[in-house]
Image (cartoon, coloured by chain):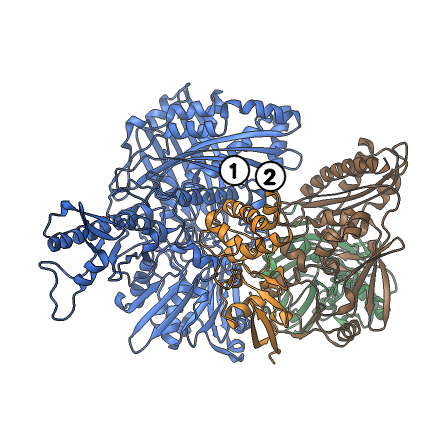
Chain colours: A green, B brown, C orange, D blue
Amino acid sequence: MTVTFHNEFSVAASTEQVWAFLTDPALAVPCMPGAKVTELIDKHGFKGLVSLRAGPVQLQFKGEGQLSDLDEAVKAGSLTARGSDGKGRGNFSAQMRFRMAAIPEGTLVSVDTDLALSGMVAQYGRGAGVVREIASQLTSQFSKTLAEQVLLKSGVAAVAEEFPATGTSVSGASDIPSQNNAVTTVDQPNSINVIGLLWASGWSALKRSLSRLFGNSKNS
Amino acid sequence: MKPSSFKYHNPQIRSEVLALLREQENCKVLAGGQSLGPMLNFRFVMPDHLIDLNRVTDLDGISISDSKVRLGAMTRQKSIERDESLRRLCPIFSESLQWVGHYATRNRGTIGGSLSHLDPAAELPGICLLYDATLRVENASGHRLVPANEWSVSFMTPNLEADELLTDVEFSPWTMPHGHAFVEFSRRHGDFAIAGVGCLLALDRSGLIKRIALSVIGVSSTPFRLTGTENDLIGYKPDDNALAYIHQAIDGIEASSDAQTSGQYRKRIARVLASRALEQASERAISAMQ
Amino acid sequence: MKDLRTIHVLINGMSYQRTIETRMTLADFIRHECGLTGTHVGCEHGVCGACTIHLNGEAVRSCIMFAVQADGAEVTTVEGLASPDGKYHPIQQAFKNNNGLQCGFCTPGMLMTCSAFLREYSNPSEREVREVISGNICRCTGYQGIVNATLEAAAAIRKGGL
Amino acid sequence: MGARNVGAAVQRLEDDRLLRGQGRYVDDIHVHGELAVAFVRSSEAHARIISVDTSAAVALQGVIGVFTLADLGGLTLKPMILANPSPLIRHPITQHVLAQDEVCYVGQTIAVVVAENRYVAEDAAQLVQVEYEVLPAVVDARQARDPLSPPVHQKFSDNLAAKVSWKFGDVDGVFSKAPYVFRESYFQHRGVPHSMECRGALAQYDQQADQITLWTSTQSPFLVRRFIAQFLERDESSIRVVAPDVGGGFGPKAAHYPEELLLVVLALKLKRPVKWTEDRLEHFLATTQQRDQWWDVEVACEADGKVLGIRGLCVHDNGAFLPYGLLLCMTTVVPFPGSYAIGSIDITLDCMFTNAVPTTPIRGAGRPNATFIIERSMDSVARNLGLDRTTVRRRNYVQKHQFPYPTGAKLPNGIAVQYDSGDYEKCLEMVLEACDYTNFETRRAEAARHGKWRGLGVVSYNEDCGLPPYEGATVKVLPSGKLCVELGSCAQGQGLETIAAQIAADQFGLTVNDVVVKLGDTNSPALALSTVGSRVAATAGPSIHLAALQVREKALKVAASQFEVSEKDLYIDAGIVFVKGLPDRNVSLGELSKRLHASVGVLLPMGFTPGLEATAYHTPERAVYSNGSNAVELEVDIETGEVRLMNYWVAHDCGTVLNPALVDGQVIGGVVHGIGNALFEHMKYDQSTGQPVTTNLGEYLMPLATEMPKISVDHMESPSPVNVLGVKGAGEGGTIPAIACIISGIEDALKPLGVVIKEFPLSPERLLELIDEARTATAA
């Protein structure tokens, strides 16, 4: 199953600052909810973990990522990542193409993502809807956290502004029509790399709402 | 399709359950197991600890007292379906349960399980919404009360912490004469609802809407109540205009699509079901007043 | 690190004590630990109903329950449906009379579902019978023989009792 | 002595054990020291395997071994035997028992785990790490046919597995002269088999006797033995294959599978019995399916509806491999022209590889697809010419006086296709009367008054069944006096034990309870092939009859010599040979059997060979042709797209009816299978990744009791001249016309809206789309 979506967000910082942050896996990856870098292969390659919950289903993907086609002049590049669930329940591969543009508020970052799932996680047809939902929640959360982190890193205090993602579609049999899905009813992610958030303020205050995103529902 | 291994716990009392939930990581609570069982066999869910509620003595039971109904989380769907006094007070429960799974699964399935698993197509969460039920959630250090409309967080994700347990559901049946309807559409009997609409409706003498509750299941990632719409309908006739208004609300829903069914179709069906529900509820509301 | 329990289950009036892994399904326990292979496993996700048995008198799916949950319980399987002298339960006789089976794989689940149902409702309509067996999948018969058999068994029970 | 059993609704011999839970299916059989097997299957639709790391799995407690193809080595390294090879196959490719370096569908076997039980085996399978290089996948046969399509197999530059053509008559002439030519495009999807018992196998190797025994849930024990023997380069006598009780077949269990073969390999390697019981998820991922066909069809006809010719192209999705050759493809084209005397046919079928589970025949094989095209074409002619659907059919039927009717087609084996017997129009009359066709419009109008859209579907079909060349039978009188019938053929619920007993018992005035029937064992003295294509009653049936006759003749001869009378003066009743008019001069068959078994020093009756038994073969050259007409009455809810089936009627002609109760069961079950194909069952694949997305029974919708109509069956008997019993097949005749019938009924219900239906399965959502399209079209 493939999910493709586009989203944009602005950061109150210069394109140089955002570029420096976004092209450094050690800084950028932890902004993805539940993601962390376990090993830096080189300047742009890394190994890592992503854990997430879809309702009662808890998955941990182990894999690697590579930044490529980095063009500092036009501030564009892409990230390719793939990984598989430690318990053999499926694999993912993702292609994220990002571009930056200077705007009065600072920097506008736009990201196009192609996410492909395989194995059991991709074979539950009723899950197609939730994969889209989770994927867009993840990206939106990623952009939020990234915006915050860039500011914390560059010491500027300002708030990132989220623009609604403009397109989401799941191709093929799980034939989901494109529709605007302004994420998100949800504040924050649950499985998230603590290191990535230690700088962030009010961590403990966030905890309750964090744990709700993918839910620690236990009854059935 | 065999479950992965886990440590099995079958506590006898509630406090043991809460203690386990506090102490152990990656727990899963087993109620009726009619949804969790398959997920364990598919290994979608692989808990380290399985906490079986089936031997806990004080989680089960239907109690009806001074205009309050209390359903213990472990009350079986079969018991709710067949309880005579509940059927008199809230016939919509047994009516909607005709759509829940099958004869054999209702023997095991529980209301607490349905609410906590929170499948978007599940019927009982939609019914609890209609009655503005209050859900009691406990952990080892206390409890909190969650209003039904704050229960659903996102897809199959209730407002429940890792260390918390849903213990019971409480609500007040409508006392004024009223009508009810629960209509659902699925591909086959007992299948996941493509859409379902529940309606409680009270009319005044002149046939105007005095009170109305509408909930929709199956259409989006969580069940929901058309609260805003309901308020606007008070004082109007349950006629085509009212319906057009309800349809408008349904058109605004962000519906989920999956491999089988598009969100557009779900909404289309929900519109049809809303019409049928309102019609049936009105008829019943009128005869209830005679 | 196996999680083992010793359980004791009364199946068809015989008591079985076994030490098993707690993750073992009740269906696998009945079939492979107790050797009662009449209970069949068709989907292992609670849809096809082939594994239906009676747990303390109620029809349940044994593929989505754990054996350990049946510790101390009374279980009836298809092998226990006929009376000890071998006389058919009315539902078995009716299935035979109405060609309610072909390959026989869904049959034990059908019989257990219908026999439990008929104990509760001895005068069902055809619609009610179809709804009850909608939790049991048969690929062979097209259900008609099964529906007719269940209605005939209901009549027999009303007349002669069990 | 008239037939007392054949033709009667005798109760089944099979039922008692099945009703008591005493059936014996493969998973019920346990042998000492048995180990459990689980498979590591591809999670990708198309990929190169970079590495398989089994170390963690091997280390798990309770694991006996984890193997990849390389680990097994030796003879196992070659691809499996291709069943039914054909010169038409361009790429005769079969799987290896475990993938070598490329996987071509989700579910293909990559590694195998052997463990103390299935739970541990699955734990270990989860621990096997497979690293893939994911390759582009294609699961749409039309896309696979595109020259620019990615290859399904890297070693082939294109995806065309075979091109099949079915042509006779002056097609071009007919189409150039015909006053009317109508063109349509159709889509057909048939889903997953889903016998309620999944596949399963138990393999045991007796090292001292160098003897392999394989219990397997199969429709073809003799063929499975043949393929295993060829693959392992062993002599067939060292392999015994047994099909015990089998919980439904429906076609896919006739194929030979990697898992089945691999179990034998493991039993030989480990010298321990190994069992694999397929679970439902594996059934979705690895048991052969039937899937998509896209058709472009032209029909040439006269103004009065007389059809002159049909021509068209079918693009057929065959999945990733060809385990079963082209049988599914052939059965898609060979049925033309169906029940109709149409002189010119030209059908081309492109059999495409796709990155999906391989396909083989499922109940009816390609016949329901062909029937859908033929019957939709008849409806299209009626619609376009403004004629009644039944008028058009009457005008085109092969007429009663034309039998035996040569269609003009020749099979690949050179035999001309010839319909043996029947009265097609009579079957239509029967079903029209049953459904009260003449008053339907009144019912439609009445329903319309209540806002209901009611429709009636009517179709006809015929079916080549009882396919040559043989299924053997051995009939014995045991010294006990009991009759014993042994068949190599096996059954999956059809009631073969019962009809075998009926046929044999009739020669000796016995009842079916005096007969012991043994099935599905390659140790049977009678050779057999496969229980497919509605063929066993029409092939094994006559063989049983012939063998019983020979036994009867011998019994009479021996008795005649004993009583010193002529055989003409004898008769047999209740298993006793009597001298006519002298009832106290008699001898039981058991007594005769004892004498013919003799003992050391005791001579046989003068001039007789030992034993009172015979093995016989009915070896027809041609198929027999069942036929029938179906009707359905239904209502469509145009708000939701729901279709409510009210009544379904079948007029069915399978020649001599051996047991009406069993034929009804076969037909009704078959109709419901067809209803599933028409309205519910859809095996969906993600088009971009080739992931199957309906892999559980909550999402793959099999028919349930609640949605099925009342089905009534009338029988007509046109005995076949091809065999002595006059019997034809009944196993698939319910399914073959059912899809076309349901679709025709829905189209009829929506006639006022101008909805034309060219596809199935038809979900409520899709039906609403079609209604919307029709409405906008008429609005414009």
Q: Is residue D542 above or below residue A98?
A: above
Give x and y (percent) for residue D489. Answer: 32, 55
Instruction: Provide the residue designation for mark 1.
Output: D759
Q: In the image shown, does D319 or C157 lie closer to the viewer?
A: C157
Q: Chain of mark 1?
A: D
What is the secondary structure assignment of the residue under circle 1?
Answer: strand
Give x and y (percent) for residue A45. Answer: 64, 69
Answer with left or right where residue D95 lies relative to residue B41. left
Name the residue at 68% across, 67% down: A50
What is the secondary structure assignment of the residue under circle 2?
Answer: helix
Q: Quadrant of the N terminus of chain D?
A: top left
Q: Quadrant of the C terminus of chain D?
A: top right
Give x and y (percent) for residue C36. Answer: 50, 67
Tell me the amino acid under the disc marked 1.
Answer: Glu
Give x and y (percent) for residue B258. Answer: 64, 50
Local crowd size for mark 2, using a 10 Å CA cut-off: few (<14), some (14–19), many (≥20) = some
Local crowd size for mark 1, using a 10 Å CA cut-off: few (<14), some (14–19), many (≥20) = many
Q: Both on one chain, marks 1 and 2? A: yes
Tell me the amino acid under the disc marked 2.
Answer: Arg
Marking on residue B169 = none
Whether residues under marks 1 and 2 lie with C-beta atoms below 8 angstroms apart, the answer is: yes
Q: Please indicate, yes or no, whether residue B288 appears anywhere in the rendered image.
A: yes
Q: In the image shown, does D504 or A164 lie closer to the viewer?
A: D504
* Mark 1 → mark 2, Cα distance in angstroms: 10 Å
Q: In the image shown, does B236 or C135 lie closer to the viewer?
A: C135
User: Going from the N terminus, do you reach mark 1 or mark 2 first?
Assistant: 1
Marker count (numbered): 2
Answer with left or right where residue D38 lies relative to residue D273. right
Q: Please indicate, yes or no, whether residue A91 appears anywhere in the rendered image.
A: no
Q: Quadrant of residue A114?
A: bottom right
Instruction: Provide the residue designation for mark 2.
Output: D766
Q: Chain of mark 2?
A: D
